[in-house]
Amino acid sequence: MTIELQILGSLLRAIAEEMGAVLVRSAFSANIKERRDCSTALFDERGRMIAQAEHIPVHLGAMPDAVAAVMAHEPRRGQVWALNDPYTGGTHLPDITLVSRTEAGFAVTRAHHADVGGREPGSMPADSRTLSEEGVVIPPTLLDDEAVARVVAQMRNPDERRGDLRAQLAAHRLAEQRVAELCAQRGKDTVTSAMNELHAYSERAMRAGIARLPDGRYEASDVLEPMEGELELHATVTITGDAVTIDFDGTSPQHEGNLNCPLAVARSACFYVVRVLVDPDVPASGGAFAPVTVAAPDGCLVNARPPAAVAAGNVETSSRIVDVVMRAFGEAIDVPAQGQGTMNNVTLGNERFTYYETIGGGQGACPDADGPSGVHVAMSNTLSTPVEALELQYPLQVERYGLRLGSGGAGAHRGGDGVVRELRVLEDCRLSIISERREHAPRGERGGSAGAPGRNLVNGEPAGAKLTRDLAAGDVVTIETPGGGGWGS
């Protein structure tokens, strides 16, 4: 890359990062302000991702679908469009995406809102069966003051919701200003040419990395843990020259619960795996994803059709897609052992407050290193809510928070340990837990031992991987997250 292109690429990435900083610092809810459950990116005039902040893979990989959905409405400068419909460019309903024009393309923010008017406080019910139970569905909508008022009126804690939307809007105004300044300093033609070359460079780098992999057809299967029974994930990875095709034929049909996800989410997970295994340092523009084709039968678990519920698909099924695709690649090259494979979603709330968090866990060991302990990685990549912030803002008390020692799998390199998170509720509320890997432990690799499966408990009594129930003041919820698998015997 030329020096000028390096500089322009860094400037565009800096704008995306600054958008994220504005969003985080301006947000009202702990989920965005403390956990940073949000993502920001810049796109060109053709709707191609050019630069992103290093935020959340499941958000970022699915963003192009949202931009395409808004572009169909021919948005004008000065307008901001909003959507969360999973079947029109979204992921799941709490993730509200805003798209606006800049002088050289589009700015995009996506943030997980702590409530969007679902049947349960927090809008992450474990037992939803249709999309309408999970909250307000927002098709591509021009977001003016009237639209903001109409949307937040259908959600719990409307002042907090309005505050988080305004934080996203602030990030868009920042992006519009910074891109205009860059075009004024360097010339719009130069900036757009740099965008084209950044996209092309990422594609060239990724294709060169894929070409070094052994050609072939590699398959793997795994299972998800719905409230009843099991669901199969099946992936076939075909490497041909400098391209990869990932096909989910053989995956279970969409089901009556909420582990379904749109194809955009499945693509996000696949893009993440290929980038990690082939060239983790390649600039993360849409060009890096161009050599990867993802296919799945219509109406299957990872290419669901409306009105299927999707609350858990974005968080849990995406995590397990990473596991199964990584395992398929493991037939061709060395890959890490399986990590916790879940985000351990915990939602607490009533009509007065809503609180949502994901909890880190153990990650799989690598061929040359132990797995990290107690972290959010893979499709999540968020932070933990600090104890002080949680207890200051919500009627919750943290009784215990620490590593689940010994939960990582043994091996030449040991898997990371999971986490124990114990919360006492200080007023009556509702609890929803959506988690995976409670029955099926994360697998070791090349002879390494499996990590310990996770456990959920309420007042010391075992609870299921997925549940929604009442809690009384004083009740205690304990989440023990899985450990990562070990690598090597």
Image: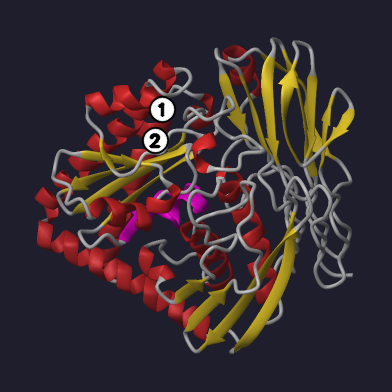
Q: Nearer the viewer, residue 202 or 266?
A: 266
Report the amino acid beneath label 1: Arg
Residue appearing at x 38%, y 23% in the figure: 152
Query: Mark 1 falls on what kind of element?
Result: helix
Q: Whole-percent x and y of residue 130?
A: 55, 43
Residue at image mark 1: 25
Report the amino acid beneath label 2: Ala
Q: Residue 400: which quarter of the image? A: top right
Whether residues under marks 2 and 1 lie with C-beta atoms below 8 angstroms apart, the answer is: yes
Residue 36 can be seen in this image? no
- Mark 1 Cα-neighbour bin, 10 Å: few <14, some 14–19, many ≥20: few
Query: Mark 2 falls on what kind of element?
Result: helix
Residue appearing at x 57%, y 14% in the figure: 393
Q: CA distance from mark 2 to mark 1?
A: 6 Å
Extent of the magenta region: 49-63
Q: Nearer the viewer, residue 419 or 224?
A: 224
Looking at the image, residue 320 sits to the left or right of residue 247; the answer is: right
Magenta segment includes 106:
no
- Relative vertical location of residue 303 with respect to residue 111 in this rendering, above or below: below
Residue 139 can be seen in this image? yes
- Relative vertical location of residue 254 with respect to residue 240 in this rendering, above or below: above
Looking at the image, residue 21 sits to the left or right of residue 273; the answer is: left
Residue appearing at x 77%, y 42% in the figure: 465
Residue at image mark 2: 21
- Mark 2 Cα-neighbour bin, 10 Å: few <14, some 14–19, many ≥20: some
